[in-house]
Image (cartoon, rainbow, N blue to C red):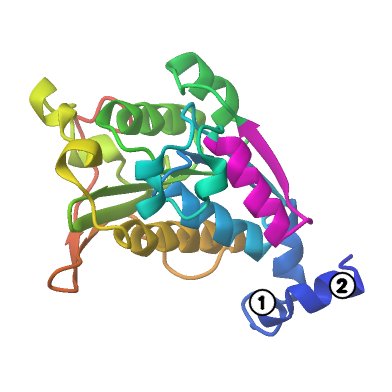
Amino acid sequence: MLTSTQKERYARHIMLDDVGITGQEKLLRARVLIIGAGGLGSPVALYLAAAGVGTIGIADSDCVELSNLQRQIAHGTPDLNRPKVVSAREKMTTINPDVTVVPYHVRVTPAVAAKIIAGYDFVIDATDNFNAKFLINDTCVRAAVPFSHGGILRFNGQTMTVLPGSSPCYRCLFPEEPETEEIAIACSRAGVMGVLPGVIGTIQATEAIKHLLGIGTLLTGRLLTYNALSLRFREVPFKKNPSCPFCG
């Protein structure tokens, strides 16, 4: 049962026919894991906390650097050299003390991913490298845990949602990891527009909330791309690959 304070906090959710008190209670019971506490992970973490997702895990091995602050809005100048997961947890619980934030200040290896992902209802891929993205896909598909993929570079972003067992997975679209030179291209070398992760991250948070509530149409079998310079979204449909080693 929601308390009177919770009813006031989540009043704008409760007013929605597709959410209501029952839906808000679902969110408070839900568990979402965010892998990456940087550009994409910051808006996801803040909005999921504000929405009242009851348990939010956040995994990242990095500490806050000055160059992060142009886009990673969960962190501020006083957080320099602190673990990102600690900094993010403080902001999230300040926004909403209802939320339990579980920090994982670790590098997400295959063993770590297999251990923590299975305990969540939905996963957010907010990482910035291809190795991690393939690892998240493969682990989530094996564990049958839905996830949202997000990626940003320069002025471009992309996102899609994977429901293991019913939708295409990341490897259906990108079967193999890129060559070494391509992997090396990251925002640290190529740059990224500071507001770009806010656009993609909020879409990822939206997908998580929709899935938890069982409402709307998820971004499955569709890669949504965004170019900030032209301010255009493009949707690229794709199907399951029968030869996919993970979901085919």
Give the residue number, with chain letter if any, for mark 2: 5
Q: Which residue appears at 57% of the width and 57% of the height?
A: 46
Q: Quadrant of residue 52?
A: bottom right
**Viewport quadrant of the N terminus:** bottom right
Above or below residue 11? Residue 217 is above
* Relative to 55, 225 lies left or right: left
Residue stretch in magenta: 84-103
List x then y, in percent, for residue 126. Answer: 40, 43
The overriding secondary structure of the stretch rendered in magenta is helix
- Quadrant including the C terminus: top left
Give yes or no for contact between labels 1 and 2 (Cβ–Cβ under 8 Å): no
Disc 2 crowd rating (10 Å Cα; few below 14, some 14-19, many 20+) is few
Disc 1 is placed on an element classified as: helix
Instruction: Using residue 164 as the reference point, say whether residue 45 is left or right of it.
Output: right
Q: Is residue 89 above or below residue 23?
A: above
The correct choice, above or below, for 21 with respect to 143 in the image is below
Looking at the rendered image, the disc whose residue lies closer to the viewer, 1 or 2, is 2
Does 72 appear above or below 241? below
Identity, as a three-letter code, of the amino acid under mark 1? His
Instruction: Determine the image quadrant of residue 68.
Output: top left
* Residue 172, horizontal then vertical, whole percent: 22, 38
User: Disc 1 to disc 2, how far (Cα)?
Assistant: 14 Å
Going by the numbered disc 2, the residue's amino acid type is: Thr
Which residue lies at the image location 72% right of the left edge and 67% below the top edge? Answer: 24
- Residue at image position (31%, 40%) is 169
The single residue placed furthest to the front in the displayed view is 78
Identify the element where label 2 is drawn: helix
Q: How many marks?
A: 2
On the image, numbered disc 1 is attached to which residue?
A: 13
Q: Position of residue 88 (x, y in %)?
A: 58, 45
Let me know if residue 152 is in the magenta part: no
